[in-house]
Image (tube, helix red, strand yellow):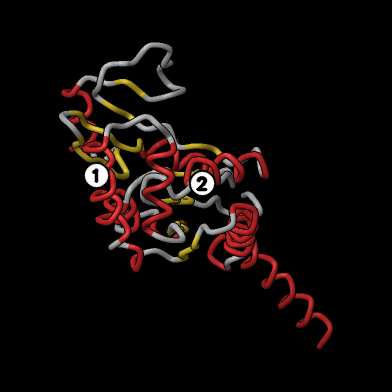
Amino acid sequence: MTNRRGLLIILSSPSGAGKSTLSKRLRAWDTTIRFSVSATTRQPRAGEVDGTDYHFMSEEAFKRDVAADNMLEHAHVFGNFYGSPRKPVETAIEAGCDVLFDIDWQGAQQIRNSSLAPNTLSIFLLPPSIRELHRRLVGRGQDAPEVIARRMQKSWDEISHWGSYDYVLINDDLDRTAADLKGIVTATRLRRTQQPMLVDHVRRLQTEFEEMQE
C-alpha cells in the first residue's frame, strides 16, 4: 500500500483565465502529476499522437465504453464525443499518483458524482474582470470578433458554476495564483482520506500504549 492515495485534480476556468499556464506550472512544480489524456471520436489533426494528445476512438467503441461505465466523464461537443477513460485514472490513484484534469464544469460534476469523488479536488479559476478576460481573448489574435463574442458567452456560462467547486482562485496575479494552487494541492494530499496508512499507524500506537500499561 502506498503512503497516500492520489488525487483527481480538476482545474476549470473560462477561456483566457490562465488555466493552461497554471496547469503547466503545477506539473513543472511536481513532475509526478500526470495529465489525464482524453478519448475522442474526432479525427487526429496534423502532428497529434494517439495516446499522447488524445486516445482516438471510433464512435462505436466510445459508446461501448460509456455503456460499460469505462468513462469517468464524457460529453458531445461540436459533433464529436470526448471523455476521460476510467482505468488509467484508477491505476494512478491506487499507485499514489495525482492526475490533472482540464475539463469544464459538466465533466467536473460527472466526476464528483462518480465512485472516485472522495479522491477529487476541484479548483475553479476566475479572471480579475470580464474586461480583462475580453482583452486576453482579443490579445491572442486568433479569432474573429463573432468568435470572441461566442467565447465570451461560453465563458460567462462557465463562470456561473463557480460555486460547485472546492476552491476558487481569482487569477489577478499569476505568481501568487500558482503559489496558492500548489498550497491547495499540498494541503489536500494530507487529507485524512488520502492517507490510508494512518489506520495501521494508529493501531500500532494503540498496541504500544497497551503494552506500556501492562
Which mark, by number, is residue 93? 2
Label 1 sits on a secondary structure element that is helix
Q: Give yes or no for contact between labels 2 and 1 (Cβ–Cβ under 8 Å).
A: no
Q: Quadrant of the C terminus?
A: bottom right
Residue 50 falls in image quadrant: top left
Q: Which amino acid, mark 1?
A: Ala
Query: Percent from the top left, x then y, of residue 49?
Result: 43, 16
Query: Is residue 144 depicted above or below 104 in this figure?
Result: above
Instruction: Give the residue at the far top of this rendering.
Output: 46
Residue 149, labelled with which disc? 1
Horizontal arrangement in the rendering, residue 87 relative to residue 172 (left or right): left
Vertical relation: 78 (above or below) 102: above
Q: CA distance from mark 2 to mark 1?
A: 39 Å
Marks 2, 1: nearer the viewer: 1
Residue shown at 61% from the left, 43% from the top: 25
Looking at this view, is 9 or 90 the one in front? 9
